[in-house]
Image (cartoon, helix red, strand yellow):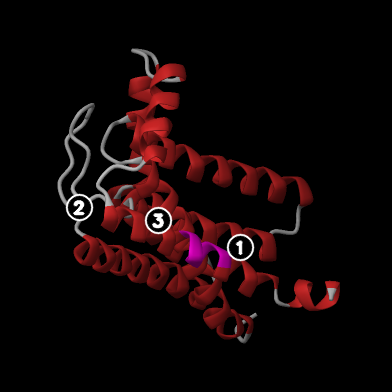
Amino acid sequence: MKELMKKNLKWLILLVCLIGFLKLAEEVFSKEILQADIIGYELISSFLISDFATPIAKFITNFGGPIILIGLTIILAIAIKNRRIGISIFANLCIVTGLNILIKQILQRPRPTEYRIIDETGYSFPSGHSMVSMAFYGFLIYLIYRYVKDKYLKIGLITFLSILIISIGISRIYLGVHYTSDVIAGFLVSISYLVLYISSVNNWIKASD
């Protein structure tokens, strides 16, 4: 049983995350603001919001925005010798961005307006910054895990990117442009997507090693 679960762990992760996302989507359909949204914002506003933290949140949130992500994609595509890896990074960004736009258009949840620190347009669920960041940096984490040989560099980079992903999600709640459920849903659907994407490109990348 343990061997079977280990062999199929990625599919179990996909299933759990997808169920979690669908559950949140169902609740969003039934009511506009969830209890988790209120609790999430109250926690962040109580412990984090300050004149010192606001510029930091504005800075961090940019790492989930199109300018930095497109810039990083171009830099990585040029710097990485394996062209298939560069193509897969570019395709990943395009696919997850398109998927986020599609889901937003289907669910059409309005953004929160009560405590907004910055201006944003478009629909709220799931958070585009959170969803795209999880997919983009999550795929980089996979590539680092697979290709970086130095143990300490690998751990350092994976830890940094993991913290960055979480921080981007928190920044969206902090800045008042997303509900907590938007961010969690973005993370969950992206993890499910990543399992499928990595599985689909893994052998293609391997063929060029």
Which residue lies under the disc numbered 2? 123
Give how far across and how far down residue 31 sits, in percent.
27, 49
Magenta-tinted stretch = 16-20
Residue 72 sits above or below residue 165 on the image = below
Three-letter code, disc 1: Tyr
Horizontally, residue 135 falls left or right of residue 155, namely left
Q: Is the residue under label 3 in contact with that under label 1 (CB below 8 Å)?
A: no
Q: Is residue 133 visible?
A: no
Three-letter code, disc 3: Leu
**Front position among marks 3 and 2:** 3
Who's the residue at 49% across and 67% down the image? 18
Who's the residue at 32% across and 41% down the image? 179
Q: Residue furthest right?
A: 2
Q: Is residue 199 visible?
A: yes
Q: Is 19 covered by the magenta stretch?
A: yes
Per the image, label 1 sits on a secondary structure element best described as helix
Which residue lies under the disc numbered 3? 24
Quarter-of-image position of residue 55: top left
Alpha-carbon neighbours of circle 2 within 10 Å: few (<14), some, or many (≥20)?
A: many
Which residue lies under the disc numbered 1? 142
**Real-space Cα distance between discs 1 and 3?**
27 Å
Residue 13 sits above or below residue 62 on the image = below
Per the image, label 3 sits on a secondary structure element best described as helix
**Real-space Cα distance between discs 3 and 2?**
16 Å
* Disc nearer the start of the sequence (3/2): 3
Residue 91 sits above or below residue 136 on the image = below
